[in-house]
Amino acid sequence: MVGAVYYPALAISIWWVRGPAATWAVLAAVILAGVTSVVLAYSLLFITRRECPYCWTAHAVNWSLLILSFWLFARPS
């Protein structure tokens, strides 16, 4: 349920974010998702030791969004 709200909200906010406060809010959300993916990936690798292609796809998407968001917001306007 969180992802069903998070991904569309992020897609919309990337296009409409203006101002430093909104930029920091988007970056905070992306960082939180990236850190959560790191914790869950660690769990997959070392605790549950399960293969989950859906999980790894979601982790890759979160990490890509993290990199792309920093790249997008770090560019001079």
Image (tube, helix red, strand yellow):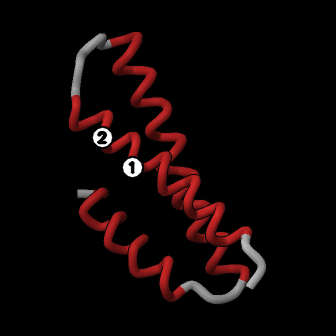
62 is higher (above) or lower (below) than 13: above
Measuring 49% from the left and 33% from the top, which residue is drawn there? 38
Instruction: Single out the residue that lies furthest toward the right.
Output: 76
Crowd rating for badge 1 (residues with CA inside 10 Å; few <14, some 14–19, many 20+): some
Measuring 30% from the left and 11% from the top, which residue is drawn there? 49
Corner quadrant of residue 6: bottom left
Q: Secondary structure at mark 1?
A: helix
Q: Secondary structure at mark 2?
A: helix
Question: Where residue 42 sits: x, y (%)?
Answer: 45, 21
Q: Quadrant of the N terminus?
A: bottom left
Pointer 2 residue: 57
Corner quadrant of residue 56: top left
Pointer 1 residue: 61
Q: Quick one: 60 or 30, which is closer to the camera?
A: 60
Drawn side of residue 13 relative to residue 23, left or right: left
Give the CA distance from mark 2 to mark 1.
6 Å
Question: Where residue 66 sits: x, y (%)?
Answer: 55, 54
Question: Where residue 68 sits: x, y (%)?
Answer: 55, 60
The kind of residue tagged 2 is Thr
Are the residues at dot 2 and dot 1 in contact (C-beta closer than 8 Å)? yes
Measuring 74% from the left and 85% from the top, which residue is drawn there? 77
47 is higher (above) or lower (below) than 34: above
Question: Where residue 61 sits: x, y (%)?
Answer: 39, 49
Crowd rating for badge 2 (residues with CA inside 10 Å; few <14, some 14–19, many 20+): few
Which mark, by number, is residue 2? Answer: none
Drawn side of residue 71 relative to residue 74, left or right: left
26 is higher (above) or lower (below) than 39: below
Measuring 22% from the left and 27% from the top, which residue is drawn there? 52
Drawn side of residue 73 relative to residue 5, left or right: right
The kind of residue tagged 1 is Val
Drawn side of residue 5 relative to residue 63, left or right: left
Corner quadrant of residue 58: top left
